[in-house]
């Protein structure tokens, strides 16, 4: 049996799988996974078109799934891996979950929370950006080029 690697890159690859699933459904390709104790406990991707719901972002879906999995609303011992920098709505929701850590891939130059509300996250939440940034950003570029 091979050695299992638990790295930010390995979990971001899981989030990218979710983003690709969104891409296939003609949703904006953002994917997210939430990890606790080195296990993926929630997987999600954007479903705003399918659900006709502007709040159905990948992170929001993942927060709900993780809370259901854990049986509680606080995610302080969890890490959110998301392919795109969270928007203000998702960062605000992350605050309420008290998530321990957020790792994101590509920066959102137009709607990312760091543009307008860099202090919106819970004070204990740690953030790491730029993990597999090129791969995450490339999927977004392909999606929007296809729509033009």
Image (cartoon, rainbow, N blue to C red):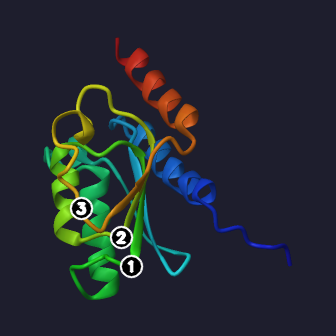
CB atoms at circles 3 and 1 under 8 Å apart? no
Q: Classify residue 109 by image quadrant.
A: top left
Q: Residues within 10 Å of mark 3 (few under 14, many from 20)?
A: many
Q: Does dot 2 land on a helix, a strand or a loop?
A: loop
Q: Classify residue 33 by image quadrant.
A: bottom left
Which residue is drawn at the image coordinates 17% and 52% (left, top)? 120
Above-or-below relation of 79 to 68? above
Above-or-below relation of 53 to 115? below
Cα–Cα gap, marks 3 and 1: 13 Å
Q: Which marked residue is nearer to the observer: mark 3 or mark 2?
A: 2
Above-or-below relation of 14 to 35? above
Toward the top, the furthest residue is 148
Identify the residue position indicated by label 3 in the image: 94
Which residue is drawn at the image coordinates 33% and 32% (left, top)? 108
CB atoms at circles 3 and 2 under 8 Å apart? no
Percent x, y of residue 132 = 57, 41
Percent x, y of residue 19 = 45, 45
Identify the residue position indicated by label 2 in the image: 100
């Amino acid at each position: 049996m091979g050695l299992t690697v638990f790295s930010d890159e390995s979990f971001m690859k899981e989030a990218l799988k979710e983003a690709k699933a969104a891409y296939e459904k003609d949703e904006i390709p953002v994917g997210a996974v939430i990890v606790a104790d080195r296990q993926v406990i929630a997987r999600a991707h954007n479903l705003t078109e399918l659900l006709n719901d502007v709040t159905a972002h990948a992170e929001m879906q993942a927060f709900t799934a993780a809370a259901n999995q854990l049986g509680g609303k606080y995610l302080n011992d969890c890490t959110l891996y998301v392919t795109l920098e969270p928007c203000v709505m998702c960062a605000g929701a992350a605050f309420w979950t008290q998530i321990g850590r957020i790792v994101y891939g590509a920066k959102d130059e137009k709607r990312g929370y760091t543009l307008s509300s860099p202090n919106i996250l819970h004070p204990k939440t740690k953030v790491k950006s730029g993990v597999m940034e090129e791969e995450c950003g490339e999927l977004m570029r392909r999606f929007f080029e296809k729509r033009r």
